[in-house]
Amino acid sequence: MDFDIPENLRMTVETVRRFVKQDLEPISRQVEEEDRIPEDVIQKMRDLGLFGLGIPEEYGGLGLGCLGECLVYEEMGKVNACFRTIIGTNNGIGSQGIVLDGTSEQKQQYLPKLASGELIGCFALTEPEAGSDAANLKTTAELKGSHWVLNGRKHFITNGNIADVATVFALTDRAKRAKGGITAFIVEKTFPGFYVGTIERKMGMRGSHTCELIFDNCLVPKENVVGGQENVGKGFRTAMKTLDRGRLTMGASTMGSAQKLLDLSIDYAKQRVQFGKPIAHFQAIQLMLADMATNIYAARQMVYHAAWLKDATNSSVIKEAAMVKLFCSEMANRVADMAVQIHGGMGYMKDYPVERYYRDLRLTRIYEGTSEIQRLVIARELLKD
Ligand code: COS
């Protein structure tokens, strides 16, 4: 492996780093309080191309590749998670179904607008009875003439309330389910029968919304099956492949958050005085800082290696992606806990950002596949023939 990061990626990362510092960091607290990102900031994200990081250049994206995307997400992880989340579905789960399996007409129709941020995408797989057991979904799709008719209810859909277009997974053959009975559809919010339901109240991730999507006899044109008619029944594979890539970028951003928490903890430990000297002088604090740094170092190597492997071989990195998501999210939660501990009482106060990271990072062990599901995926890969 070549550890040198190519010049063009360095420049992209530098631009994003500056944007995070100059434009996002200063309003982090404001978006936390108002639970929304100002429109002019979203526009700056569009101008920088952040909605199309992973979308190929021929469709208007930056076409960064996995390593490039991970480097950007590492930087985006260093600030309020809502900023990463708003671009996350367009680059990841909200567009990758079309990137990976869409027809060329679908790519031409949707990807340029997703890449520019003119359209917001989302990914509608999860249902009340289909979380970790994603194949147990109940939403149905029935072909009637020129349209599929979708009925059902999705929940916990990130960006669902602001999405213009959703990749929706529905049952087209109850008997076959994951093995040929689930189909992916591109559903626009203007299609009749598409409704936004309850917007959830969450522990964290303020500024980013999660909601129900309801399909009540929703009419989806036949040509909106992801990949066309020959892909009817192949949607579960599309969902799984999409999640694999998302797990790498999720790992990268949680690793970036952990780095930020380490930086904040070092600064705080150097200036907080107890027993007549800065607490950085005490071994109890030093041991925590050393553990945080060591964990982050390990996580960074995993992220870069798995991303490089994906780019270099274009092979499916199912096991590596699950390992990255598992290790990075668990590691970042441990780091957040130590950061709060180092900050002491201040770490529990809303005036200090560590409190926000602590809440926001808790979700990373749950969404886009729980830690338990990642372990299951890794074990399956280890044990298969
Ligand atoms: N890439 C490509 N295809 C995959 C795949 C992957 N990573 N994982 C599974 N598949 C395919 C299988 O090969 C199988 O296809 P064939 O029938 O052609 O062989 C099909 O999909 C069904 O797979 P499987 O039998 O493994 O399905 P299970 O119902 O046992 O589900 C898990 C497997 C648990 C891995 C799946 O339900 C899962 O990932 N759950 C977590 C979902 C999740 O992350 N949700 C987060 C919310 S969405 S943001």
Image: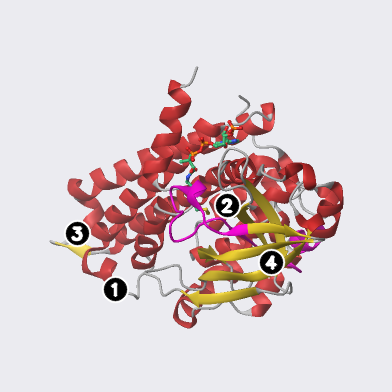
Pointer 2 or 4: first along the chain:
2
257 up-or-down from 7: above or below: below
Residue at x-position 71% and y-position 46%: 232
Mark 2 lies within 8 Å of ligand 1 (Cβ measured): no
Query: Helix or strand or loop: what does disc 3 sit on?
Result: strand
Amino acid type, residue under disc 1 in the picture: Met
Any part of residue 246 in sight: yes
Residue 51 placement: quadrant:
bottom right
Q: Of circles 2 and 4, which is in front?
A: 4
Which residue position holds label 4?
120
Residue at x-position 41% and y-position 62%: 360
Residue at x-position 49% and y-position 76%: 199
Which residue position holds label 1?
349
Q: Of circles 2 and 3, which is in front?
A: 2
Real-space Cα distance between discs 2 and 3? 37 Å
Amino acid type, residue under disc 2 in the picture: Tyr
Real-space Cα distance between discs 2 and 4? 18 Å
Q: In the image shown, does 124 or 296 lie closer to the viewer?
A: 124
Any part of residue 163 in sight: no
Amino acid type, residue under disc 4 in the picture: Ile
Residue 181 is situated, as x and y percent measured from the top left of the image, at 61, 44
Pointer 2 or 1: first along the chain:
2
Residues in magenta? 112-140
Q: Which mark is residue 107?
A: none
Tags 2 and 3 in contact by the CB under 8 Å rule?
A: no
Left or right: where 137 falls relative to 344:
right
Which residue position holds label 3?
277
Residue 11 is situated, as x and y percent measured from the top left of the image, at 70, 49
Which residue position holds label 2?
73
**Label 3 environment density (alpha carbons within 10 Å; few <14, some 14–19, many ≥20):** few
